[in-house]
Image (cartoon, grey):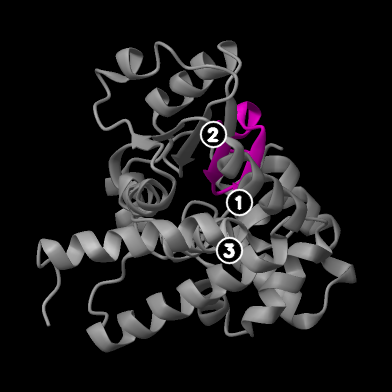
Amino acid sequence: MSQTDIYEQMIAKRQEMSKSQRKIANYLISHQETAPFLTASKLAKNVEVGEATVVRFAFFLNYEGYPDLQRHMQEALQRKWTSAEVFARTTERGEKPEDTVSEVLSDDINNLQQTLQQMDKKEFQGAVEDIVDAERIYIIAYRSATSVALFLEFYLDLVLQNTEMVRSADGVSEHLLDIEENDLVIAFGFSRYTKRTVDVLKYVKQKGAKTLVITDHMLSPLTPYGDRKLLAVTEINSFIDSFSAPQSIVSALITAITRSEQDKVERRLEQLEHLWDAFDVFQE
């Protein structure tokens, strides 16, 4: 959808809008270079309407929600903003730290709520089954996404003993040389997406391996290569991504997997407890 399409749609539907919706439309039209980077809560604050009104406005324009509208507005700019540019467009001078913590935590709560609302429970269940059934599991994540991926690797390998995160971008080809159809690749990618993650997914799909993609939007370049796709809203009024929702999805996956393999996991944890005691791992 082009920039003209989006904003002409707002103009064309203006007479059908409520007073609050017209305020939102006017603001978006007047701030076409900065508004696409505002979270729903920040946009609501700037326009002086309720956050729920912003969400309903997106539905009114036939989008799947505010993140869907926001992504289309960003794409309408027809260029990729650098981190420095996003920072400049989402930062106001003189904001107090106490205001920032309230804003960011509110955005995280909103991201979690929206992620839960759009979660495909059957897709989640399928992802759990694929992880349990996999012979070997490889995790692919680069840059900031590694923070979430490391947490998943730690717990999956702790209980399943078949999980490896490919840490070296240069050595990825050697790690995946012998990948087979009964193996699973879990890939993390959030805007701005790394080309290497997409290239790895292309390769493992050619090898016939199963894939699980954890990303932020159906328009993500990772989604075409995912047999399973779990979407997490990561929007925040900053140049960074909010990983509260991806982290919660990972926690849910680990919990569901261990519950489905309860007997195996109990035996494994009992063995580990003896090992941890022998090596005096934890502070008494």
Which of the numbered marks, if any, corresponds to residue 259?
A: 3
Q: Which residue is mark 1?
A: 231
Magenta-drawn stretch contains 228: yes
Position of residue 245 relative to residue 94, above or below, is above
In the picture, which quadrant includes the N terminus? top right
Amino acid type, label 1 = Leu
> What amino acid type should be assigned to the residue bearing mark 2?
Gln
Query: Camera-side residue: 70 or 265?
Result: 265
Give the Cα separation between the discs numbered 2 and 1. Answer: 24 Å
Q: Is residue 246 above or below residue 178?
A: below
> Which residue range is magenta in the image?
212-230
Seen from the viewer's position, the closer of residues 169 and 31 is 169
> Nearest the camera: 44 or 187?
187
Circle 2 — which element?
Answer: loop
Report whether residue 22 is seen: yes
Q: Helix, strand, or loop for circle 1?
A: strand
Looking at marks 1 and 3 on the same chain, the residue that comes earlier in the sequence is marked by 1
Callout in the foreground (2, 1): 1
Residue at position x 38%, y 54% in the image: 155
Where is residue 201 drawn, in percent x and y?
A: 51, 23
Q: Quadrant of residue 65?
A: bottom right
Disc 2 crowd, CA 10 A, few/some/many (<14, 14-19, 20+): few
Image coordinates of residue 273 in percent, x first then y, are: 27, 66
Q: Position of residue 147 (x, y in %)?
A: 31, 52
* Up/down of 250 relative to 170, above or below: below
Residue at (71% x, 60% y) in the render: 118
The residue labelled by disc 2 is 78
In the rendered view, does 282 fall on the left or right side of 51?
left
10 Å crowding of disc 1: few (<14), some (14-19), many (20+): many
Q: Amino acid at mark 3?
A: Arg
